[in-house]
Amino acid sequence: MKTTNNVTAADMALKRAFLADALPLTLLCGERVIRGIPEDFSPGTVRRQIDSSITQTITEGRNAEGLTLRVECTEFHDFPVVEWVATIANNGTEDSPVLTDIRLNCVLQGTEPVLTHGNGDTVLPDGYQFFTDELTRPLTLAPRNGLGAHFALPYMRLSFREYGVNLAVGWPAQWEASFTPVEGGVRLTAGQQVLSAFLRPGETIRTPRLTLMGFTGDESRARNLWRRWYFRHILPREDGAPLPPKLCLHTWNMGGTSEFTAATEENQIGAIDTYLKGGLKPDIWWIDAGWYPCDMIWTNTGNWRANPDHFPKGLGPVGTKCEEEGIRFLLWFEPERVFCGSELAVEHPEWMLTQRDGAGNAVGTDRLLKLADTDCLEWLIEMTDRYIKEYHIHIYRQDFNIAPLPFWTQNDEPGRAGMLENLHTQNYLKFWDTLLERNPGLWIDSCASGGRRNDLETMRRSVSLHYTDIGYGNHPIKQKQHRELFEWMPYFRAHTMNWDQEDGSYVEWTKRPVDEFAYQCALAPAVTSMIEFTDSEELYALGRKMHPIWREAAELMLSGDYYPLTECRFDPTDDYAMQFHDPKTGRGFIQIVRNTLAKGNQCVVYPVTDSNAVYTLTDRLSGERLTKTGAELKSGFTVRQARRTGVIWFYETVDGRQ
C-alpha cells in the first residue's frame, strides 16, 4: 500500500527498525565508555507532538556531578525518516571530565553494502561528482577546512541488496562519518571530527544531526522519495507556502569595478525602472558584496553600514522601491570574515580569531569572527536584525569566503580541542533561527564561496541561490552540478551565461551574449538572467520570450519527480537530458540539450511514462505538437537537432491519467 507520498508499508517498517535500536549516542567520559544514557544518569523520556506528521522523543539524564546527556529523536509519520541529535551539558559546579569520541553510532542491517557519495563543492571544475564504493572495508568521509560540504557532500546513499538508506549529516563545519562492515551489516558513526574537551559549568556541546530515510526499490525511487520529503519538510517557506520559482536581476561591475562597489541608490533604482519598462520584472533584486565602505575592494569586510557616498540614506530607499514594485530585495553580508583594518576589528579585537604561521606571525588580512562568544553573537543578531528592518530586506544572503578550521584549532584552549568549532556552529544556527523568528517572511540564501557548507542543518533554514563559484557559463560543468543538486538540494539558482567559443571549447568569463541556449542550460528553480539593463531591445525580447517558458518548467521542477535521462560526465561531446513528472497532475517536461561538440544530429532518450496513457507534447518555442503513447515514448523518443541547441517538450496526458 502506498501513501500520497509514494511511501509503502515496507518503507515504514525500515523506519521502525531505526527506532528499535538503543539510543545511538556513544562517548568517552574520562576513562568511562558511555553508550546511550546509563542508569546512573536516571534517564527519563518525554514525547511531544510537533505537528500532525512529526513527533519528537527526548531522552535526558543527569548524573550526580551534573553532567546531562540529552538525545533527541525526530520521527516523521508521513515519510520513513528518523533524525537523531544529542547534546551534552555541564549543569554542575565543577569542570567536567574530558569528553572524547562523541558519536552517533548505529548498525544498519543488510548484505552487499554499497555507498554512493559526492565531493560537494570543491570550488574546482571537478566538484559535484558522484562516487560509488563497495563497502568491503572501512570507509571514512570528511570535508576539508571546516566547511561542511567542501570536498565531501554530507548527503549519501547506502544501498543493501534488500533495501537502502538515504542519509545526511547535519553539521556546517568539520564532520566525519565512518562506514565499517560488520557481521550482518554496516556500522555507521557520525560526529564532529575532532572534539576532546572538558566542559565548564553552564556549557553545552552538541553532535551533528543524523538523518536516516529508509527506502525499498531502486535508485530512482530513493531519489524522488528524498525530494518529496525535502520539499515537504526542509525547503523554507515564503508566506506559508513552499518557495516558488524566482527570477533574479541585478546590475553590477559598473565601469570595471569589483562586484557591487560602484552600486548607488540612483543606479540601482534606475536599473529597476529600466527593467520594468522593458517588460522584465524580477522576483528578486540582488545587491551583492561592496555596498559598505571598503575602498572599492569588496573583500574589505567589517564596516557594516551602507557606503554614505553611494547610499546617503542607507539602503532603505532601494528596499522600499522593491516593496512598491512587488519585488523581494536580497542583500549580501559576510559577517564571519572580518578584514583586519575594519571598524569591527578595531572596535572589538577580543572577537577576532587570527591564524598564525610557525613563527607566530599573523597570516593574511582576514580574521574569523569569534561567534562562540555570546556577546559577539548578541551584537551580530542586533546589527543584522536592525538592517533587515531598516533596509526592507526580504532575503538575507550570507557568504563565507574563509576556511575556518585553522582559526578554530589554533585558538582552542589547551584541553579543549574542538570547542570553538562546536560553540561557533551552535551560535551560527541560533543566529539564523533568531533572524527568522524576528522577521516573519524573511528567508536566507546560504553561500560559502558557493556551496561549501550546505549541510542539512543549514538547508532547513535556507536555500542555495549560489551553489558554486565555478562554471557559470560552462554548460557541461553546470549540467554535472545540477545533476547532484536536483537529487539532494533541489532548490538552487543558475546563470544564463555562455562561455563557449566558436570551436565548441570553453574559456572562463568570455563575454558572449545571452541566447536561447544559455537559458536552456540554466534551467533551474531559480535563475539569474544575464540580460543587462542597458542591453538592446532584441535581448529584452529574448527575456520576454524565455522567462515564461523557464517559469513553467521551474514550477514542474518543484512539484515533480526527477529522472535523469542521460549520463552526466562533464563532456561537451555528450547530450544532456532530464525529465520532471508531476504524478498529481500527469504533467511534466522532457528537456534535451545537445552540447557544443555533440556527436551526430540526433539524441534518443527513454522517458518514464505510463505505457497505457496517451500524451500530448508541446515545444513552446516552436509551437510544434506531438501525440504519442506512453509505450512509444518508453521505447525511445528521438529528437533531431543541431549542436548547441536545446528543446523542452512539455507534456500532459490526454485522458487525465496521472
Image: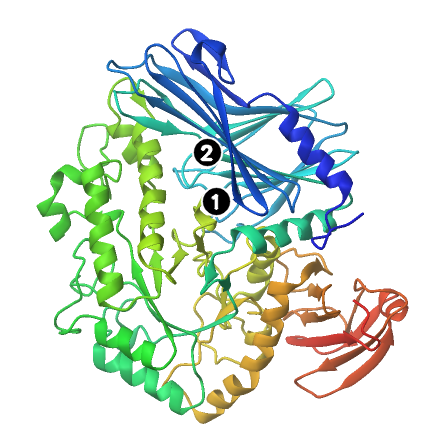
Which secondary structure, mark 1?
loop
Image location of residue 654, percent across then percent down: 82, 78
The image quadrant that residue 580 belongs to is bottom right
Which residue is at 51% across, 55% downward?
235
Which residue is at 39% across, 38% downward?
145
Q: In screen coordinates, is 25 left or right of 250?
A: right
Question: In front here: 310 or 652?
Answer: 652
Question: In front here: 66 or 193?
Answer: 66
Image location of residue 237, percent across then percent down: 48, 60
Q: Which residue is mark 1?
A: 455
Which residue is at 70% across, 25% downward?
136
Residue found at the very far top of the displayed protein:
31
Query: The C terminus appears in which quarter of the rendering?
Result: bottom right
Which secondary structure, mark 2?
loop
Which residue is at 77% across, 41% downward?
9
Q: In screen coordinates, is 109 left or right of 454?
A: right
What kind of residue is marked 1? Asp
Q: Are marks 2 and 1 in contact (CB under 8 Å)?
A: yes
What kind of residue is marked 2? Pro
Residue 234, compared with residue 237, is above or below; it is above
Image location of residue 198, percent across then percent down: 31, 17
